[in-house]
Amino acid sequence: MEVFSMGFKVNHYAAKTIKRTHTVDWELISIELIVGVICCVLAVVGYKASMLLIFIPAALIASLCLMGIVYSFYFCIKERQAKRK
């Protein structure tokens, strides 16, 4: 496909779509696990010290990291089940 614009000739080749499979990236999961555990410890310390300024953000980040790990494993299991059918 050729596009003419302001006197310049530009050849545009559209990217072809490929079927992408989900792979479990163990490095990403381990980093999320480490960050989640650290934030969980900070949340517990903030809760025991009655410091909401530390507890709320740390608990939120810890829950998001741990939910991301659970989602990655869930999606991987669902994909393997779909391949078997």
Image: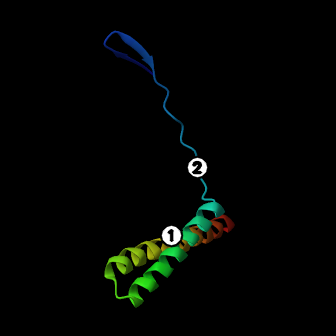
Q: Tell me where residue 7 appears, x and y as whole percent.
A: 34, 9
The amino acid pointed to by label 1 is: Gly
Q: Tell me where residue 57 appears, x and y as whole percent.
A: 37, 74
**From this viewpoint, which residue is outermost toward the front?**
49
Which mark, residue 26?
Answer: none
User: In the rendered view, would you say 47 is above or below 27?
Assistant: below
Residue 73 visible, this angle? yes
Q: Residue at x 59, y 71 (%)?
A: 73
Check disc 2 and report the residue beneath it: 19
Q: Quadrant of the N terminus?
A: top left
Q: Residue at x 34, y 83 (%)?
A: 51
Which mark, residue 68?
Answer: 1
Q: Disc 1 versus disc 2: distance between alpha carbons?
A: 23 Å
Residue 25 visible, this angle? no
Q: Residue at x 53, y 70 (%)?
A: 35
The amino acid pointed to by label 2 is: Lys
Q: Quadrant of the C terminus?
A: bottom right
Quadrant of residue 77 within the rendered picture:
bottom right
- Give the secondary structure at mark 2: loop
Task: Give the side of residue 62 with respect to residue 19, left or right.
Answer: left
Q: Tell me where residue 80 appears, x and y as whole percent.
A: 65, 67
User: In the rendered view, would you say 50 is above or below 1?
Assistant: below
Residue placed most toward the observer, 28 or 59: 59
> Would you call the spot at circle 2 few (<14 residues within 10 Å), some (14-19), or many (20 or more)?
few
- Dot placed on the residue nearer the N-terminal end, 1 or 2: 2
Task: Give the side of residue 3 with respect to residue 36, left or right.
Answer: left
- Give the secondary structure at mark 1: helix
> Would you call the spot at circle 1 few (<14 residues within 10 Å), some (14-19), or many (20 or more)?
some
